[in-house]
Image (tube, grey):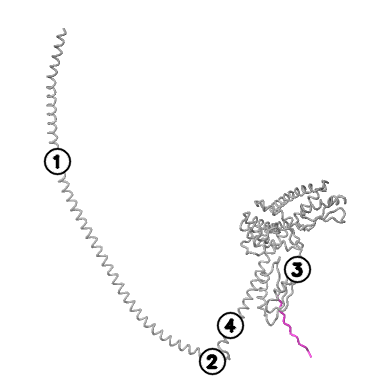
C-alpha cells in the first residue's frame, strides 16, 4: 500500500514538472499575439489621426490667410479714411491761419496809422504844455506883483487857512458826535444804572480796628490779667491782638488791624469768661477752637455770599477767601458786602444789555478776591485776584474782568465793562466809603496841576470834591474851536494820570471883556 502511494506521488510530481513549462509557453505565446494585434490597431489609428490633423491644419491655414488679407484690406481703408480727414482738417487750419494773417496785417496797418496820429498829437500837446508853463509863470508873477506875496508866503497863508478850516470842522464834528453820543448813551446808561441801583438794596457794615467784650463784673478784669500778667500775655501772644484793660466799667477793648485775629480773640475771650477757668493752658485751647470756628464761619459766609447772588461751582478755596473778605474793608466799605453788591449790579446791568447774567455775577463777585490776601502776599489786589482766578481755573472772561476793573488792562468783553461800571456805582454811592481829607486835597491838587500844564490855561479850579474842574483860558490864545479840543485833551490826560471812582467833569471857560470909560 505504501508503495502505491509513493508511486502515485512520484507520478504526480513528474506530471507537474512536464506540464508546467508547457503551460507557461502557451501563456507567453498568447500574450505575445494579443500585444501584436493591439500594436497593429494602434498604428492604424495613429496614421488616421495624423491625416486628419494635417487636413485640419491646412484648412485653418487657408482661413487664417483669408482673415489676414481681410484685416489688411480693412486697415488700409481706415488709414486712407483717416488720412483724408487729416488732410481736410489741415486745409481748414491753413485757411484759418491765412485769414488771421490777413487780419493781423490790417490791424498792423491801422496801428501804424494811429501811431502816426498820436505822434502828431504828442507834438501838439508838448507845444501846448510849453505855452501853458509860460502862461503859468507869467500868471504867478502877476499874482505876486498884485498881492505883494511870494509863492511860499501864499502857500503858508493857504495852509494856515485850510488848517483853521479843518480845525473848525474837526471841533464841530467832535462836538456834534459827543453831543449825539451823550444824548443816546446817557439816556440808556441812566436807565440801566438807575434800574440796577433801585433793584439792589444791600446793607453795609463798617468794620473798625477795635472790638469790645462785655464783662459780667469788674473782678473779671483781674482774672483776665492773671498772676503777674501771665493770662493777658498768653492771650496777646496767641492771638496777636492787644488787650486794653482800663477804667471802662465791665468792658475790655481788643485792638488790632487784623480783623480775623481780632475776631478770634473776641470769641476766645468770651468763651473763657463764660467758662470761668482762665489760665494759660485753657487760653491756648480756647484760641485754637476759636480759630477753627472763624475758619468755618468764613467758609459759611463765602457760601452764603455765593448763594445770595446765585453762583455755583466756585472752587472751595475761592469760597473760603470770599468769606475772609467779610473782615476786610476798603475806605470803610466792607469788601464782601461790596463784592455782593457789585455782583448784583453786574447781573442787573447784564440783563439790561442782554449778556450772560451768571457770568457777569460771577465776575462781579470775584472782582476783588485779591483783597483777601493782599496784606499777606506782595502785589496789588488786581494782580493777586487774577492769579487766584487762573489758579482755580476760572474762565478767561472772569480773569479779564478782574484785571480790567481798575483799568490796569483793556477790557476784552462787555461783561468786563459792566463789572467796572458796577464797581464804580457801588464805590461812589454816598456813604459807602469814607476818605480822609488828605485824599481829597491830593486829588484837588493833582487835578489843578494837570489842567495848568496845558498851553493857554490861565487858571483852573477843582470843585465838587474833585468831581469837576473849571478851566479859565486866555481868550487871545484859545479860540472857540480850540476850546473843544482842549477840553478833550484835558479829559484824556486826567484819565491817563489819575484813578478815581465815577467821572470828572471838565468845564473850559473863555471870556472876553472890553472896558471903556465915558468922560
Question: Viewer-nearest of labels 4 and 3?
Answer: 3
Question: Which range of residues does the magenta coloring cover?
Answer: 508-519
Q: Which residue is mark 2?
A: 142
Callout 2: SS: helix
N-term-proximal mark, 4 vs 3: 4
- Mark number, residue 50: 1
In this image, 81 relative to 140: left or right? Answer: left
Badge 2 crowding class, 10 Å Cα cut-off, few under 14, some 14 to 19, many 20 or more, is few
Q: Nearer the viewer, mark 1 or mark 3?
A: 3
Q: Above or below — where is 187 with respect to 508?
A: above
Q: Earlier in the sequence, mark 2 or mark 4?
A: 2
- Disc sitting over residue 159 in the figure: 4
Q: Residue furthest top?
A: 1
- How dense is the environment of label 3, judged by Cα within 10 Å: few (below 14), some, or many (20 and up)? few
Determine which quarter of the picture holds residue 486: bottom right
For marks 4 and 1, give the CA distance. 122 Å
User: Quick one: label 1, few (<14), some, or many (20+) residues within 10 Å?
Assistant: few
User: Is there a contact, CB below 8 Å, between mark 1 and mark 2?
Assistant: no
Image position of 46 with respect to 181: above or below: above
Q: Main secondary structure of the magenta part?
A: loop
Q: Is residue 81 above or below residue 300?
A: below
Q: Earlier in the sequence, mark 1 or mark 2?
A: 1
Quadrant (top left/top right/bottom left/bottom right) for the N terminus: top left
- Spatial CA distance of label 2 from label 4 is 21 Å
Front disc: 1 or 2: 1
Q: Are marks 4 and 1 in contact (CB under 8 Å)?
A: no
Amino acid at each position: 500500500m505504501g508503495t502505491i502511494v509513493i508511486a502515485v506521488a512520484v507520478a504526480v510530481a513528474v506530471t507537474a514538472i512536464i506540464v508546467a513549462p508547457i503551460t507557461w509557453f502557451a501563456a507567453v505565446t498568447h500574450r505575445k499575439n494579443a500585444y501584436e494585434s493591439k500594436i497593429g490597431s494602434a498604428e492604424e489609428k495613429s496614421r488616421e489621426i495624423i491625416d486628419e490633423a494635417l487636413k485640419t491644419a491646412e484648412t485653418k491655414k487657408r482661413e487664417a490667410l483669408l482673415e489676414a488679407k481681410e484685416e489688411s484690406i480693412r486697415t488700409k481703408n481706415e488709414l486712407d479714411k483717416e488720412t483724408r480727414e487729416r488732410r481736410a482738417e489741415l486745409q481748414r487750419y491753413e485757411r484759418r491761419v491765412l485769414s488771421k494773417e490777413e487780419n493781423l496785417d490790417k490791424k498792423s496797418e491801422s496801428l501804424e496809422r494811429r501811431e502816426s496820429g498820436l505822434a502828431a498829437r504828442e507834438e501838439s500837446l508838448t507845444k501846448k504844455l510849453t505855452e501853458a508853463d509860460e502862461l503859468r509863470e507869467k500868471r504867478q508873477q502877476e499874482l505876486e506883483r498884485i498881492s505883494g506875496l511870494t509863492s511860499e508866503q501864499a502857500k503858508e497863508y493857504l495852509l494856515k487857512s485850510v488848517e483853521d478850516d479843518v480845525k473848525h470842522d474837526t471841533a464841530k464834528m467832535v462836538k456834534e458826535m459827543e453831543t449825539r453820543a451823550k444824548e443816546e448813551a446817557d439816556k440808556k446808561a441812566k436807565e440801566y444804572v438807575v434800574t440796577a441801583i433801585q433793584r439792589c438794596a444791600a446793607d453795609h457794615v463798617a468794620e473798625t480796628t477795635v472790638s469790645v467784650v462785655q464783662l459780667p463784673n469788674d473782678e473779671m478784669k483781674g482774672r483776665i490779667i492773671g498772676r503777674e500778667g501771665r493770662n493777658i500775655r498768653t492771650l496777646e501772644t496767641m492771638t496777636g491782638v492787644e488787650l486794653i484793660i482800663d477804667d471802662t466799667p465791665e468792658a475790655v477793648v481788643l485792638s488790632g488791624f487784623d480783623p480775623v485775629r481780632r475776631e478770634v480773640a473776641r470769641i476766645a475771650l468770651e468763651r473763657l469768661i463764660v467758662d470761668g477757668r482762665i489760665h494759660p493752658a485753657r487760653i491756648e485751647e480756647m484760641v485754637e477752637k476759636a480759630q477753627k470756628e472763624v475758619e468755618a464761619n468764613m467758609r459759611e459766609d463765602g457760601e452764603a455770599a455765593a448763594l445770595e447772588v446765585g453762583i455755583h461751582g466756585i472752587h472751595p478755596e475761592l469760597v473760603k477767601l470770599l468769606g475772609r473778605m467779610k473782615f476786610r474793608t476798603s475806605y470803610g466799605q466792607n469788601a464782601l458786602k461790596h463784592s455782593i453788591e457789585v455782583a448784583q449790579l453786574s447781573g442787573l446791568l447784564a440783563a439790561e444789555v442782554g449778556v450772560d447774567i451768571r457770568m457777569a455775577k460771577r465776575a462781579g463777585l470775584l472782582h476783588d478776591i485779591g483783597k483777601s490776601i493782599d496784606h499777606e502776599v506782595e502785589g496789588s489786589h488786581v494782580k493777586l485776584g487774577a492769579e487766584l482766578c487762573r489758579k482755580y481755573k476760572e474762565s478767561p472772561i472772569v480773569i479779564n474782568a478782574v484785571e480790567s476793573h481798575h483799568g490796569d488792562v483793556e477790557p476784552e468783553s462787555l461783561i468786563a465793562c459792566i463789572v467796572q461800571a458796577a464797581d464804580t456805582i457801588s464805590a461812589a454811592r454816598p456813604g459807602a466809603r469814607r476818605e480822609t481829607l488828605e485824599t481829597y486835597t491830593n486829588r484837588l491838587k493833582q487835578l489843578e496841576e494837570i489842567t495848568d500844564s496845558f498851553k493857554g490855561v490861565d487858571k483852573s479850579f477843582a470843585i465838587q470834591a474833585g468831581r469837576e474842574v473849571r478851566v479859565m483860558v486866555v481868550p487871545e490864545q484859545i479860540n472857540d474851536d480850540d476850546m473843544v479840543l482842549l477840553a478833550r485833551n484835558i479829559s484824556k490826560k486826567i484819565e491817563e494820570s489819575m484813578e478815581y471812582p465815577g467821572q470828572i467833569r471838565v468845564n473850559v471857560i473863555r471870556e472876553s471883556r472890553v472896558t471903556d470909560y465915558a468922560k
